[in-house]
Image: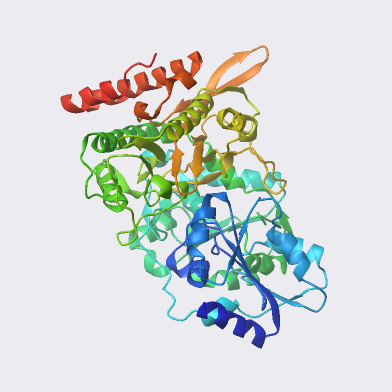
Amino acid sequence: MNSRLEDLRHFLNSKGIYAYLLTNSDPHNSEYLDDHYKKIEWLTGFTGSNATVVVTMDEALLWTDGRYFVQAEKELKDSGFELMKMGEKGVLSVSDHLKKLLEEGRIFAFDRDSITASFIGKIKKAEPDVIFYDGEDPLDQIWNERPERTAAPIFVLDNEYSGREYYDKLIELQDKMNDWECTQFFENKLDNIMWLLNLRGNDIRCNPVAFSFLFVGGGNTFLFLQNKAVSEDIRLYLVSNRVALCDYEEIEDFLKDYPYEGPTMLSEDSMPYRYWQCIKDGSKIKSVPNVIDLMKSVKNNIEIENMKKSFLYDSLAMTRYLRYLKTSDLTGETEYTIGKKCDEYRAGIPGFLGLSFDTICAYEGNAAMMHYEATENDCSSVYNKGLLLTDCGGQYYGGTTDVTRTVALGEITDEERISFTYVLKGMLRLMNAHFLKGCTGRNLDILARSPLWEHGMDYKCGTGHGVGYCLSVHEGPQNIRWRYNPNMPETVLESGMTVTDEPGVYVKDKYGIRTENTLLVTDDIQTEDGEFLRFEPLTFVPIDLDCVDVNLLDKSEIRMLNEYHKAVCDKLLPLMDSDEAEWLLEATGEVK
């Protein structure tokens, strides 16, 4: 029996609360969380990044997406929570399920610091007579010995890396405010605030961000930071840029008391209800797609130059790691020890700040869990046979990297080789796409999936996501996915954007295969039919030819594979010693 769930229900019952909603987020709509905000993990034991919970006296449900189905089934065992597989046939969405629960007179509680204003707006529209509990978050009342919020030192990302002065970005933001006829702007997303001000921190593991809020109005910029994270150098930097430094804890009072003069621009899709309500009481709100999301998604020339350098040395480290896997006796090794070996190769790269996410090193059936994480006390032994999947990346002053390779450690099955080859076909087709300007990722997703769909196979996640610049490894608004979602606006791909290309196959308890490169959108050609774009790979890491069934590749795919491996050699050989170079040349031998 889950005693924490029982404590929560006891509290809900004492307040007459019928249903309670909790999401895996924080006041900044972060994907990855500081320990202070891991409420769902504390309550349920589920450690995935995407989760929503609904609790009543009669049921406890947890929704997550296809990346985490296998993991959630394992972690929710004996938790008292039932897994709701998002997008699966017969599974209601969170909002549709709440519509069934909420009736006139029933009291509904939710975490006002993380549930967005747009979501609550939909609930209010669907069930206008529901009563909203106006007390503090119920889980806060029962979580004793909660970790303190991290407040790590903040630093400035110099112009040699950022490529743009803060003030130049502020002018662009103010122009967008004028376009929407807004006099104030409020931002809660940490990566957007860091990007705008050329600041970085370390408050969330693997994410160089600092807990903060930003408010622009009346010709002034107000930045809310935790006092103990701010050094004298940062204070002077903010003063020199005419940014008013405020206490992070005072944001709610500030929003309530500010003398609003016109509409305030924000994004209700990422804004917690608590802060939206503070502004709503004093100002008209214009909810628009997050303008800084789009501003930072298009990298400037200096960022692109630095990214290429960071990816080059990251690819070199990853290739050395693959050589270690393919040439070593792995007897006695585990997923955990091998994953640490991967991290060691990356840690020696100039400008390395840390990992961009915890390395996923998954052997055989564990790799079917897309975001599996081996720990020292919970991991599988590795042998010189079967498939090993490694998904990893680094944070550098000059960019953020993300790469996945699956390799054969010895003999593999025909089924595994066929699945690997189908994944490779899709990855190559997408990487080599030429497309008209105006396309979104949904127009291109079929290139990666078609080799799998032709054989009744699929992977339950998107094909690609944007990648930040010394920021979040998962960055929007651009992405590559097939499913239409009316609640998720599509973003046109533009030159200077980055996206990942990562199709896969995941067979429960047997194996998981993913091959991932990060790509840069770049200009291609101009014809009478329009302006064309293409992808340029930033990742240069060999594909394990021991996993490839060449008979399943057509002539164009063989050409693509050989051209990619030639580019890998052209990039990496000048940086290698003779033994490494000899191995790489053999590993990338021409396929016919």
Name the image quarter holding residue 322: top left
Of residue 204 and residue 249, the one placed in the foreground of this image is 204
Residue drawn 39% across the image and 58% down it: 205
Name the image quarter holding residue 11: bottom right
Above or below for 252 versus 417? below
Position of 256 with respect to 399 (left or right) is: right
Instruction: Judge whether residue 493 can be spotted in this image.
Output: no
Of residue 250 and residue 454, the one placed in the foreground of this image is 454
Question: Residue 244 at x, y = what percent?
Answer: 49, 61
Residue at the extreme bottom of the image, as rendered: 14
Of residue 249 and residue 561, the one placed in the foreground of this image is 561
Of residue 469 and residue 158, the one placed in the foreground of this image is 469
Instruction: Judge whether residue 336 can be spotted in this image.
Output: yes
Colouring chosen for the image of the structure: rainbow
Position of 446 with respect to 474 (left or right) is: right
Above or below for 504 versus 46? above
Count of marks overlaid on the render: 0
Above or below for 532 versus 297? above
Question: Residue 401 at x, y = what percent?
Answer: 40, 40
Question: Residue 10 at x, y = what percent?
Answer: 60, 85
Above or below for 18 versus 266? below
Question: Residue 582 at x, y = what percent?
Answer: 21, 22
Quadrant (top left, top right, bottom left, bottom right) of the C terminus = top left
